[in-house]
């Protein structure tokens, strides 16, 4: 996904964006993205000048990236676990017992 860096952003603009991000429970980057998208929809001809990806195209791109990542994972060599390696249940139980012992329970 492309990145954008804004230099010399006025302090008032930054503060307003930060306030709005907190109000909307978003990160600053997420709020900046929303603000830019809202502005481009409001500018006459904005959508026609630069065609943004549709939601479906973005979804398909995410799916393609995810499938490529899974293919990379599947191509990794398999790891053989020793026969005496503890099971997941045993690891969790041991961790829980250690925490309880540390707390004095």
Image: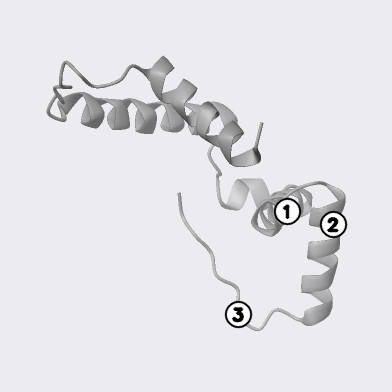
Please say which color scheme the image uses: one colour
Badge 3 is on which residue? 7
Query: Where residue 26 appears, x then y in whole percent?
Result: 74, 49
Badge 2 is on which residue? 20
Position above or below: 83 against 99:
above
Q: Residue 52 lies in what quarter of the image?
A: top right
**Mark 1–mark 2 distance (CA, rounded to whole Å):** 7 Å
Front residue (pair 81, 90): 90
Please tell me the numbered disc located at residue 47: none
| In contact (CB < 8 Å): disc 1 and disc 2 | yes
Query: Which type of secondary structure does the marked residue at label 3 adopt?
Result: loop
Position above or below: 99 against 40:
above
Residue at 16% in and 26% down? 79
Is 41 displayed left or right of 48 in the figure? Answer: right
Query: Where residue 97 appears, x then y in whole percent?
Result: 53, 27
Badge 1 is on which residue? 31
């Amino acid at each position: 996904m492309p990145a954008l860096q804004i230099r010399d952003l006025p302090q008032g603009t930054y503060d307003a964006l930060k306030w709005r991000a907190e109000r909307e429970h978003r990160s600053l980057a997420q709020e900046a993205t929303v603000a830019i998208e809202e502005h481009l929809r409001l500018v006459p001809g904005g959508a026609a000048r630069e065609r943004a990806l549709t939601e479906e195209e973005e979804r398909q791109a995410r799916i393609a990236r995810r499938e490529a990542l899974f293919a990379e994972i599947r191509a990794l060599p398999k790891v053989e676990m020793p026969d005496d390696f503890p099971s997941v249940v045993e690891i969790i139980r041991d961790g829980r017992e250690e925490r309880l012992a540390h707390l004095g329970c």
